[in-house]
Image (cartoon, rainbow, N blue to C red):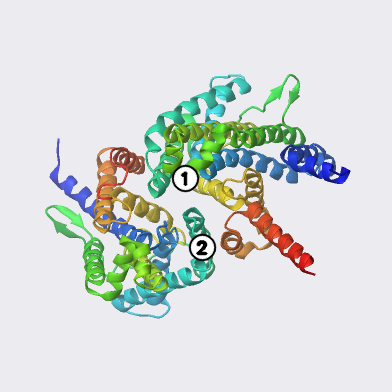
Amino acid sequence: MTRKQKIFYFITLHRTGLWVTALSLALLLFPLVENNPYTLGITNLIAINAIVVLGLNLFIGYAGQISLGHAAFFGLGAYGSAIATVNFELNPWLAMMLVALIVALVALVIGVPILRLSGHYLAMATLGLNFVFHTILLQWDDVTGGPSGFYGIPSLEIGDLVFFDEIRLHYLLWAFALLSLLLCLNLVRSGVGRGLAALAGDETAAAALGVNTRNAKVKVFILSAILASLAGSLFAHTYSFISPDSFNIFVATDFVIMVVIGGMGSIWGSLFGAGLITLLPEWMDLFETYKDFVHGGILVLVLIFLPQGLVSGLLDIFKTRMTLRRQKNAQA
Amino acid sequence: MFNLTDFLQFSFAGLTSGAIYALIALGFCVVNNTMGIVNFVQVDFVSLGGMLMFTALFTLGLPMMPGLLLAVAGVGVVAMLVERFGLRPARSDNHLVLIFLTVGLSIILRGIIKLIWGKNRMALPPLTPDEPISLFGATVLPQALWILLLTIVAIGLLTWFFYRTPLGLSMRAVASNPTAAAVVGIPAGRVRLTSYAIAGALGGLAGVLVTPITTLNYDVGVLLGLKGFAAAILGGFGSFPGAILGGVGLGLLESLSAGYLSSAYKDVVAFVVLLLVLFVRPKGLLGK
């Protein structure tokens, strides 16, 4: 191999690691370039959404299931942390772990019966769960604060370092997002992940090849619920105020839209899907009256022309172009 | 202590909303049978029906019945446009992508409704003047009777269409086996277009009938549509008798639990029962 080929081989071999390193570096330096708290607030929200979407994408893209109810787990995390830290005065970090554990148990109890359903039935059942959860948040106002929301959730802190301003939160939230990204990237390349991918392709074939499909589905469901719960806890501590409308069925649908736009089964796509859908409403101010029109329009156009999702779709187009050009050159 | 009058009153209320859910659920089933997807635009067909009725009555000054027919036909035409220009160009046959395409189209349609009719709440008059009728001691509004009557007429027409016309026959063929239907040369495009027109007309009818009772608003259809979807699932997605049974069941469940348990948690009771039914019968009550 020539030197050039060797470098090229190294890059291809370690592309995932290199991408992660590049992204981490970019995020590390980002606050130096951009220190406008408003912009950082938006990128922080992208990080929180990305954590949920990464987990949900494992469930949708890898296990081939559907959930229109992940805003409920997100909300359980947020309200769980809020209640544990304000009413029971627990340490926020401890509360976050405890709540994640409880959410995992809830997901197990719900997941076992509900994952017997498939397709539209599963979609309706999860949607129903989210609806019930949202109604309880609204009605049980002694505990949740009802429609006016829950105030005064403390910020997270490590020693004297209080995660209060946007720049510190940027590092905290993106650290969590990158850890989730690494977890997902590694998981899908493990044996378990390959089994899941087989499950998404064809459930019967996967079962025939020795994948315990029911177990695998429940496990991924629990993992995605834990990630959503962690994101919810972070959300609560970041904004110190939460209200039921952040966890309704439209939010749950938005999470799935993020997965679909980013590309089902594309881990990197999850980041882009979360980014695009979180940013969209911010750009929408430019259009004011035609807001819904543009929002829906972008969604429809992406789904019509890039049904594999933004990342895989654009990558496919690029690859096709390159191959066509190479062919042309070879002929010439 | 059991009070028969109260029970009848709750049951009538349940039947009325149940009939509306059944209409919407039938719309969901028709599209599912030909395309295999949940058509979330159905939600906006309901709002659009009420809006068109409003325009027909107050802008065009039409009487009730022609107004109703115009509104229902109008939603049918819009639904066909949605299928032809919104869904057919899609380059994917992944159901999830198609379902979220309908979510996107629903956002656009809602935007258009908001743009044309505004965000204000409007009121639609009932089909005949509101003079409560006493039935076995329970009080019933004439609009509720209209809802039940027109729902039955719509179901009758639908049955006639599916079992007595060639197009209905081809639609049943596609529902039972899409591949075989394609092999014998049934035009898929026309079947899909018709299914959307029917879904639109059913949703529009539900909107025209229900908005005099609720109020008319650009997103009035969202919650109603979700209940319709729940009703379709409860009965077994794709089954027409199931959709009717599911709709009426859900309506009764809701009004009885609102009456006897708690009105704040009536939706919770309805959805919990739905979940329990699904745990026992994962394909709905009458699903295959």
Q: Secondary structure at mark 1?
A: loop
Taking the image as shown, residue B135 lies to the left or right of residue A54, namely left
Mark 1 — residue?
Answer: A66
Which residue is painted at 46% across and 31% down in the image?
A107
On the image, the x and y values in percent for residue B19 come to 26, 58
**Residue that appears at 46% across and 69% down:** B83
Left or right: B109 as drawn, with respect to B142: right
Question: In this view of the protein, can residue A99 be seen by the observer?
Answer: yes
State if disc 1 and disc 2 touch (CB < 8 Å): no
Whether residue A320 sits left or right of residue B142 in the image: it is right
Residue A165: in sight, yes or no?
no
The amino acid marked with disc number 2 is Leu
Q: Residue at x 49, y 28 (%)?
A: A104
Depth check: give the residue in front, B269 or B239: B239
Instruction: Kindly indicate the quadrant of the structure image that contains residue A140.
Output: top left
Residue B181 versus residue A255 in the image, above or below: below
Element class at badge 2: helix
The amino acid beneath tag 1 is: Ile
Q: Nearer the viewer, residue A220 or B155?
A: A220
Check the residue under mark 2 and report the chain it is in: B
Instruction: Tell me where residue B4 appears, x and y as whole percent.
Output: 13, 45
Percent coordinates x, y for residue A84 in the rendering: 54, 23
Residue bearing the label numbered 2: B105
The quarter of the picture where the N terminus of chain B appears is top left
Residue lying at the far left of the rendered structure: B136
At label 2, counting other C-alpha atoms closer than 10 Å, the crowd grade (few under 14, some 14-19, many 20 or more) is: many
- In the rendered image, the vertical position of residue B109 relative to residue A99, given as above or below: below
- Label 1 crowd bin: few (<14), some (14–19), many (20+), radius 10 Å: many
Is residue A1 shown above or below A320?
Answer: above
Q: Is residue B240 left or right of residue A190?
A: left
